[in-house]
Image (cartoon, grey):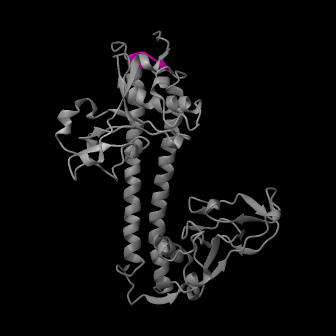
C-alpha cells in the first residue's frame, strides 16, 4: 500500500506554548497544590526533591495552567548543551500540579498532531533550534516566537500513532530495567552494611571483627605527579592516572602516557581519589604511574584484596568528613594510614567479598542491558523520527 509522504510545516501552525504564572513568594503555603518550576523539569520526567505549594483554591482560580497527565513541558531557560535542554511529560503520579513561569506547556492545536509522537521529536527538534541561536546575554531564554517559525515534520496521524507506540514500548523496557537496577543496587548496599560491619555473619563464621589501621592491613602508595613535559600519547613509558578524570565505571581509563615514572600502581590495585572529589574508589586495569590526585592500595598480611575494595566502596560516602583544604578538598597520607578498619579473618573476608562480587556482577549486567536498550532506542528514533524508516499501519486505521 502506498504511504503518504511526510510534510514539513511550521511549529506554530500546529503547536502553541503556554507559559506558567509568576506567583509571589508570599502566596506559597506549607502544603497544597505543588508548582512545577524550572528546576523541577528534568530530562523526561519531573523531579520533586524541592517543592513549593499554592493553596488548593488556585486550581479553580487558574484553570488554564492546571496540568494534566500527558502534558509536555519545556524549560524556557538558555540551554547551552543538550544536557541542559529539559523536556518532560507529566505522569499521573505528578498530579495535581500547577505551571510556574519560565516553564512552557506545549499544546497541540489540531488533531493532525499527536502529542505522544511529538514528545519524542521535540527533544531533537528544539535542540537543533537552540544550537543555531546566539548564546549571548541578550538572549537568555528560548524564544517562543522564533520557535513557532521552526519547521517540523508532519507524518500521517496513523503513522504518528504507530511510531509513538513503538517508542513507548522501548520506554517501558528501559523503565523496568532501571527499576531492576535500582533494586539490585539497594540490595547490594544492604548486604554491605550487614556483612562489612559484622552485623550479619555468613554460615560457619563467628568471633569479633578486629580493629586495625588501613596501613596495617594494606600498602598505601601516594601518587606524585610527573612533569607535564613527559606526557605523551604514543605509549612512551606508563599510562598516567592523575585523578578522577582517568576513572570510568570504577576502572582506570588513562588519557595519556608519561615517560617520567614517579609512583606506580599495579594491575588490580585499589585506586582512591585523594583530591576533589575525595574518596572515589576504583580498580586499576593497568600497571600505571599515579599522580598526586590518586593513591593505590594493596592488601597485605593475608588480607583479601577484594574485601578491602568492597570495604572502601562502603566507606566512600564518609570521606567528606575527612576532606580538608580551601582550594582543593583532599585527604593526606596520615589520614589514610590511620583510618580505622575492622576486619574478620582472611577466610571470612574472602567469603564476604565473593557474595558482594556476585551482587556487583548482577548490577553490572543490568547496567549493560540498560545502556544497550538506550542505544537501541536512540538508533530507532533516528530512523523513525526522520521518515528514513517507515512503519506499516493497519489498512483499516489508515
Q: Nearer the viewer, residue 165 or 29?
A: 29
Work out which quarter of the rendered image holds the C terminus and state it: top left
Q: Furthest-top residue in view?
A: 2
Give the magenta-colored segment's residue range.
151-159
Residue 157 lies within the magenta run: yes
Is 259 part of what is drawn in magenta?
Answer: no
From what the image shows, is residue 215 above or below residue 263?
below
Position of 396 with respect to 312 (left or right) is: left
The quadrant in which the N terminus is found is top left
Q: Can residue 303 be seen in the rendering of this structure?
A: yes
The residue at the point 59 percent across, 32 percent down is 134
Q: How many marks?
A: 0
Q: Is residue 393 among what the camera can see?
A: no
Foreground pick, 296 / 331? 331
User: Residue 397's x, y, as percent?
Assistant: 34, 15
Q: Position of residue 196 (x, y in %)?
A: 42, 77
Depth check, front residue: 90 or 239: 90
Q: Position of residue 168 (x, y in %)?
A: 39, 34
Measured from the top left, where is residue 328 in percent x and y? Answer: 60, 69
Front residue of 229 and 236 = 229
Give the residue displayed 52% in from the left and 39% down from the top: 79
Answer left or right for 291 relative to 164.
right
Which residue corresponds to the image point at 56% horizontal and 41% vertical from the top-left? 81
Residue 42, quarter of picture: top left
Amino acid at each position: 500500500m502506498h504511504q503518504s509522504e511526510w510534510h514539513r510545516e511550521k511549529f506554530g501552525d500546529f503547536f502553541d506554548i503556554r507559559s506558567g504564572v509568576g506567583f509571589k513568594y508570599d502566596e506559597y503555603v506549607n502544603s497544597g497544590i505543588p508548582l512545577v518550576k524550572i528546576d523541577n523539569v528534568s530530562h523526561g520526567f519531573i523531579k520533586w526533591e524541592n517543592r513549593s505549594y499554592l493553596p488548593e483554591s488556585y486550581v479553580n482560580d487558574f484553570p488554564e495552567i492546571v496540568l494534566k497527565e500527558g502534558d509536555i513541558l519545556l524549560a524556557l531557560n538558555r540551554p547551552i548543551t543538550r544536557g541542559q535542554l529539559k523536556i518532560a511529560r507529566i505522569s499521573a503520579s505528578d498530579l495535581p500540579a500547577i505551571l510556574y513561569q519560565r516553564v512552557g506547556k506545549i499544546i497541540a492545536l489540531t488533531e493532525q498532531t499527536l502529542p505522544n509522537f511529538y514528545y519524542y521529536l521535540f527533544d531533537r527538534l528544539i535542540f537543533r533550534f537552540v544550537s543555531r541561536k546566539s548564546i549571548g546575554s541578550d538572549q537568555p531564554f528560548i524564544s517562543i516566537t522564533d520557535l513557532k517559525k521552526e519547521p517540523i515534520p508532519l507524518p500521517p496521524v496513523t503513522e504518528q500513532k504507530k511510531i509513538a507506540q513503538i517508542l513507548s514500548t522501548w520506554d517501558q523496557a528501559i523503565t523496568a530495567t532501571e527499576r531492576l537496577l535500582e533494586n539490585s543496587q539497594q540490595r547490594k548496599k544492604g548486604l554491605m552494611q550487614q556483612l562489612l560491619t559484622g552485623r550479619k555473619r555468613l554460615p560457619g563464621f563467628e568471633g569479633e571483627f578486629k580493629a586495625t589501621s588501613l596501613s596495617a592491613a594494606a600498602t598505601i602508595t601516594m601518587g606524585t605527579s610527573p612533569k607535564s613535559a613527559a606526557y605523551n600519547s604514543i605509549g612512551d613509558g606508563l599510562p598516567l592516572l592523575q585523578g578522577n578524570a582517568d576513572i570510568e565505571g570504577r576502572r582506570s581509563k588513562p588519557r595519556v602516557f608519561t615517560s617520567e615514572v614517579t609512583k606506580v600502581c599495579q594491575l588490580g590495585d585499589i585506586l582512591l581519589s585523594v583530591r576533589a572529589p575525595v574518596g572515589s574508589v576504583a580498580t586499576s586495569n593497568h600497571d600505571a604511574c599515579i599522580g598526586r590526585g590518586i593513591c593505590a592500595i594493596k592488601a597485605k598480611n593475608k588480607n583479601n584484596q577484594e574485601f578491602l575494595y568492597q570495604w572502601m566502596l562502603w566507606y566512600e560516602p564518609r570521606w567528606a568528613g575527612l576532606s580538608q583544604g580551601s582550594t582543593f578538598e583532599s585527604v593526606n597520607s596520615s589520614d589514610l594510614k590511620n583510618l580505622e578498619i575492622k576486619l574478620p579473618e582472611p577466610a571470612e573476608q574472602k567469603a564476604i567479598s565473593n557474595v558482594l562480587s556476585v551482587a556487583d556482577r548482577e548490577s553490572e549486567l543490568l547496567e549493560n542491558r540498560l545502556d544497550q536498550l538506550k542505544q537501541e532506542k536512540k538508533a530507532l528514533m533516528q530512523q523513525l523520527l526522520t521518515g528514513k524508516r517507515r512503519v506499516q499501519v493497519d489498512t483499516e486505521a489508515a
